[in-house]
Amino acid sequence: MKKKLTMVLVFLLLTISIMGCSTQGESPEDTVSQYLAAIKNKEVDKAYEMLGGSNVPDKDRFKASIERHQLTEFKILETQEGENGVVSVKVQYKIQGAKGVEIPNELTLSLEKKGDKWGIIFSNDSSSDNQITIK
């Protein structure tokens, strides 16, 4: 009986540890949540590594932007599948403005799967105002 109980406990511990070791790429929503959490926590390197596309800003500029604006909260609103495997995730977020006032806004992030990971496509396309795309 002790042997069976020990094996069950070992199995449960392995399952929990594997679940705790999840990485970027489980789903577009997970990737967006990890990206925005990195920005909220000022983890510049982590957030920057998730960017891709043709117009990724220089890292110092990206860092300065994160340091200037404090993301206070975010919520994923909806996900839509597009063409060529690109998925759009609409997010509602708030940043802390002058005098501590929270400013709400919405943003659509486009993602593409590369291998087993989802990445954010960064785009400065004038036709997509709040569009960030990660590859």
Image (cartoon, grey):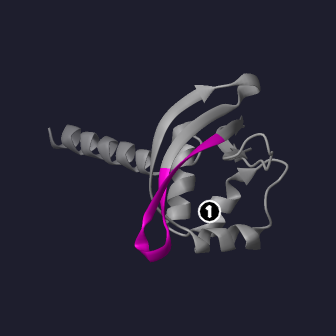
Residue 60 vertical placement versus 106 (above, below): below
Q: Residue furthest left?
A: 1
In the rendered image, which residue does mark 1 sit on?
46
Q: Measured from the top left, where is residue 50 in percent x and y?
A: 67, 53
- Out of 97 and 62, give the one closest to the viewer: 97
Q: Amino acid at mark 1?
A: Lys
- Out of 87 and 46, give the one closest to the viewer: 87
Q: Residues within 10 Å of mark 1 (few under 14, many from 20)?
A: some
In-image side of 31 versus 104 (left or right): right
Q: Which residues are magenta?
A: 93-109
Question: Can residue 26 be seen in the rendering of this structure?
Answer: no
Is the C terminus in the top left, top right, bottom left or bottom right quadrant?
A: top right
Q: In the image, what residue occupies the spot 43% across and 63% down?
A: 102
Asked if the stretch drawn in magenta spans residue 94, the answer is yes
Question: Can residue 132 be seen in the rendering of this structure?
Answer: yes
Is the N terminus in the top left, top right, bottom left or bottom right quadrant?
A: top left
Q: In the image, what residue occupies the spot 63% across and 43% down?
A: 109
Asked if the stretch drawn in magenta spans residue 56, the answer is no
Q: Residue furthest right?
A: 54
Element type where label 1 sits in the image: helix
Q: Measured from the top left, where is residue 111 in percent x and y?
A: 67, 39
Which corner quadrant of the image does residue 80 belong to? Answer: top right
Residue 108 vertical placement versus 97 (above, below): above
Which corner quadrant of the image does residue 45 belong to? Answer: bottom right
Total number of numbered discs in the rendering: 1
Q: Measured from the top left, where is residue 91 in percent x and y?
A: 52, 43
Q: In the image, what residue occupies the spot 71% across and 53% down?
A: 51
- Out of 127 and 39, give the one closest to the viewer: 127
Q: Measured from the top left, where is residue 106 in percent x and y?
A: 54, 46
Q: What kind of secondary structure does the magenta stretch mostly adopt? A: strand
